Amino acid sequence: MSRSDHKAPAAMNPIIVIPARMASTRLPGKPLADIAGRAMIVQVWARAIESGLGRVVVAAAEEEIAAAVREAGGEAVLTAPDLPSGSDRIWAALQAVDPDGRHDVIVNVQGDLPTLDPALIRIAAETLVAAGADISTLAAEIRVEEERTNPNVVKAVIALPPAARAGRALYFTRATAPTGEGAHYHHIGLYAYTRAALARFVALPPSPLELREKLEQLRALEAAMHIEVALVDTVPLGVDTPADLEKARAALTHRT
């Protein structure tokens, strides 16, 4: 392959926005849960800073979250607590911190990923730009058989050329798909958007398949938006339960 086939992504001015709210059915108040001496939201903010991608802002639903981030030296903005989704919270924060639209790539990092590999944040942003997509996201090949049939493990169905590490998303589902022999991919809920795509997405009403599968990203696919999926090696630990919290504490005890 010639040098010209390896085109660097075009220049971008990205911003990472981390939505966070105190409400959680399985782990109330989890953004402020202590992990190795820091609130979980501060740990996630630190992983985003470590990516070196650019500006990082926490979009907080409550003042106590914003205060914890600011005390750690981070930037936070208070958003309405009753916004319907993380995407809406990100858009609201963006209007507050970047009303002039200087940031053209927005990376959504979930606020419950304290052990996230910072490199994944860069991969999402670079994939978006390199593919010329509206949205990019990540997936990892499923290696544990039980995950193939677990409805809590969302599968990404990807148009993936042989040996490629990225391809266009065709569907996301809680079912086991596609059928037949071959790999299945565990979707990782980390997204990058162009600013125009995020604006369009939050203006759309929830779509029929989104409501049926309870997967927000299907709204974009039903609107014919291009979602590019990059393959990565592992799925980051999402903290949803007390057991998850203990795993995160064990992983970060010697780091911070």
Image (spheres, rainbow, N blue to C red):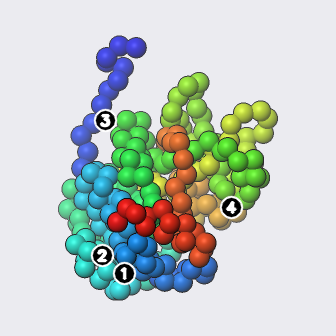
For the residue marked with disc 4, what is the amino acid? Asn
Residue 155 location (% of width, % of height): 65, 49
Tally of numbered discs: 4
Quarter of image, res 102: bottom left
Label 3: state its secondary structure. Answer: loop
Q: Which residue is mark 4?
A: 152
Residue 152 location (% of width, % of height): 68, 61
Q: Quadrant of the N terminus?
A: top left
Instruction: Say whether residue 66 is left or right of residue 247.
Output: left
| Residue at horizontal 48 percent and vertical 69 percent from the top | 249
Label 4: state its secondary structure. Answer: loop
Q: Which residue is mark 3?
A: 9
* Nearest to N terminus: mark 4 or mark 2: 2
Instruction: Say whether residue 130 is left or right of residue 49.
Output: right
The one of 132 and 27 positioned closer to us in this rendering: 27
Task: Return the residue found at the far right.
Answer: 180
The residues bearing labels 4 and 1 have C-alpha atoms spaced at a distance of: 27 Å
Q: Which residue is mark 1?
A: 65
Label 2: state its secondary structure. Answer: helix
| Residue at horizontal 22 percent and vertical 72 percent from the top | 73
For the residue marked with disc 3, what is the amino acid? Pro
For the residue marked with disc 2, what is the amino acid? Val
Label 1: state its secondary structure. Answer: helix
Residue 216 location (% of width, % of height): 56, 61
Q: Which residue is mark 2?
A: 69
Dot 4 alpha-carbon crowd within 10 angstroms: few under 14, some 14 to 19, many 20 or more: few
For the residue marked with disc 1, what is the amino acid? Ile
The answer to whether the residues at label 2 and label 1 have Cβ atoms under 8 Å apart is yes
The residues bearing labels 4 and 3 have C-alpha atoms spaced at a distance of: 34 Å
